Image (cartoon, rainbow, N blue to C red):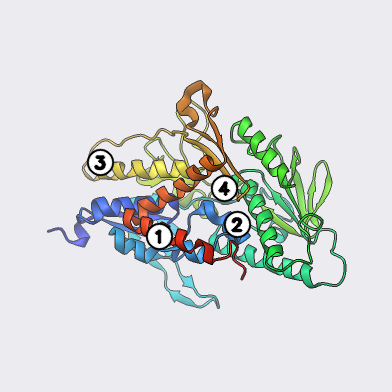
Amino acid sequence: MSTQEDLHHIIIIGGGAGGLELAAMLGNKLGKKKKAAITLVDCTRSHLWKPLLHEVAAGTLNSYEDELSYLALAHKNHFTFRLGRMDTLDRQKQEISLSPTLDEAGNEYIPRRTFKYDTLVIAVGSQTNDFGIKGIKEHCMLIDTRHEADVFHQHLLRCAYEAHTQHSPLRQGQLKIAIAGAGATGVELSAELHEAFNQLVEFGIDHISTEKDLRITIIEAADRVLPALPPRLSAMTEKALGNINIEVLTGHRITEANEDGFITDKGGLVPAEIKVWAAGIKAPDFLHEIDGLETNRLNQLVVKTTLETTRDTNIFALGDCAACPMEGTDETVPPRAQAAHQQASMLVKTIKNRIQNKPLPTYTYVDYGSLINLSRYSTVGNMMGNLLGKKAGNLMIEGLLARLVYLSLYKMHQLEIQGFIRVTLTTIANILTQKTKPRMKLH
């Protein structure tokens, strides 16, 4: 029988959707049968599906109810979890190093550690790109992580309570929210925030008016919302936003952020004391040319269609942190959850073939369409994408059907990492207890 030292060691850095799904699939196919040792590394103790972060920020989703423990998932899916943040790589030794982990007071409780690998998969996702614009870091809030989303939610509650109890008139931008970026995150966040304020008023913070005092504005440099998606979907979304009085400023490039709001190249100051930056992404800075690996201007690791990094066949990358060529174009695969899911599924076969010294498969991006969830107001989307060839994106859906498809995407992710029985029981429990809980997290 093989010992742990004899096994092929696979280390996955990053427990987002793609990295966690890959760890679970490899654990159940290789780890369970003692054909490989799989280790997942993440700097947090629990997993929350990133497409839900805008709901956490608005408070319409309780992050404590939907988070999943990495340790528990590792035990169930036959892989090992290690808490830590990778900061260095030694390709010659085939070794990664995790920086010391500190508590809230800055005290070290996990020392620096190193781990050897035979196959390394980097799946650290992306973070917001402020493009060096003046004032963004100082005056804007981000929702890249669960912690940032929780911080934003608490800030939102404080702002609402302050406006509710003060005797003086509201300041010009006091309950004005400006969101930089009309991609999926910015658009969905705007609708959730509108619903969140309606809930706050309904629950008793009623000295503020969602019609007179609240103003939500989305600012986008492109000529339409959702510029990366089909124009018809953009038009449907903008119409739905207009129905709930969310202002959309397209063709406005932000040049600066300050305490009072955003300054644009066209309209001057957009007043807002609550400012969110969601206008672009890049891979984490530590990846930039890490130990000689090729990266692009967004810090993404440049990979082949096999998802191997261009300068090391022992290292793979997937998801938002990977720049993978898209067949037949000069572009790279878009940073979307469906791409990470597809790449994770392919890497299971890749790593099995690699262990058996067989040829590696290549990845071709398949666009299954896009769905935009506007809280309880509407869900719109296009299905099948380029599977329809020249008519890509023409199959539009909205309303209940689109909402059900949107929810099914999250269920598919849960099924991959939790299994059918647990997901089924959890879903039934949520349905049974739904009426006993407020729609918004109020604390």
Q: Earlier in the sequence, mark 4 or mark 2?
A: 2
| Quarter in which the N terminus is drawn | bottom left
Label 1 crowding class (10 Å Cα cut-off): few <14, some 14-19, many 20+?
few
Q: CA distance from mark 1 to mark 2?
A: 26 Å
Residue 389 in percent (x, y) is at 48, 23
Circles 4 and 1, Cβ within 8 Å, touching? The answer is: no
Residue denoted by label 2: 143
Residue in front for this viewpoint, 408 or 51:
408
Residue denoted by label 3: 353
- Determine the secondary structure under disc 4: strand
Q: CA distance from mark 4 to mark 3?
A: 31 Å
Q: Nearer the observer, disc 4 or disc 1?
A: 1
Q: CA distance from mark 4 to mark 1?
A: 34 Å
Tally of numbered tags: 4
Q: Amino acid at mark 3?
A: Asn
Residue 432 in percent (x, y) is at 45, 61
- Determine the secondary structure under disc 3: helix
Q: CA distance from mark 3 to mark 2?
A: 38 Å
